[in-house]
Image (cartoon, rainbow, N blue to C red):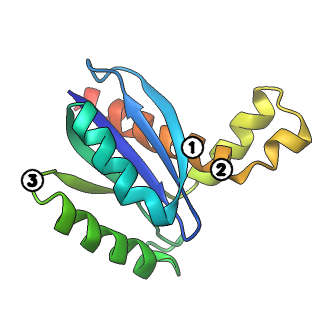
Amino acid sequence: MRILSIDYGLKRTGIAVTDEMQLIASGLTTVDSATAIDFLRNYFAKEKVERVLIGEPKQMNGQPSQSAPIIGAFIVKFKEQFPDMPLEQVDERFTSKMAFQTMIDSGLKKKQRQDKGLIDEISATILLQDYLSRKNFR
């Protein structure tokens, strides 16, 4: 079964998923946030997903960030739609900066690095890969 991660934002939502053995995280897509629940419903109908991770926005001091209420509202909708799907919040600090640096390190041109959807998808992938790394070292 797969693990899926979500980098939810006001406009766009980045989504990443593991392989069935839960070894590798890969970017899946970026969707308009208004359609995220529908996308997940369709995805869950096709693929076996064990759990979902969602980024927990925090400030450097550990306090919730300004986007926390937006993500909280999405979590409520998610739990209403998928009551049996385990959902776990994970710290997402630095994922966007790491995603941008990954794009630079990968040699993407400036115009490609301005693709905010790609940044969201890479952020979800980093979130998931970090989770897998911590899970495998426990």
Asked which secondary structure carries label 3, the reply is loop
- CA distance separating discs 3 and 1: 25 Å
Q: Quadrant of residue 98?
A: top right
Locate the C terminus by quadrant: top left
**In the image, is residue 39 above or below residue 50?**
below
Q: Which residue is mark 2?
A: 117
Q: Is residue 58 visible?
A: yes
- CA distance separating discs 1 and 2: 6 Å
Query: As shown in the figure, which amino acid type bears the numbered disc 3?
Result: Asp
Query: As shown in the figure, which amino acid type bears the numbered disc 1?
Result: Glu
- Indicate which disc residue 84 carries: 3
Query: As shown in the figure, which amino acid type bears the numbered disc 2?
Result: Gly
Q: Which residue is mark 1?
A: 121
Q: Earlier in the sequence, mark 3 or mark 1?
A: 3
Residue 100 position in % (x across, y down)? 72, 45
Locate the N terminus by quadrant: top left
**In the image, is residue 15 above or below residue 34?**
above
Q: Is residue 91 visible?
A: no
Residue 14 position in % (x across, y down)? 52, 49
Residue sitting at x 47%, y 70%: 58
> Camera-side residue: 47 or 125?
47
Q: In the orientation shown, which residue stands out farthest toward the left? A: 84
Asked which secondary structure carries label 1, the reply is helix
Residue sitting at x 27%, y 26%: 136
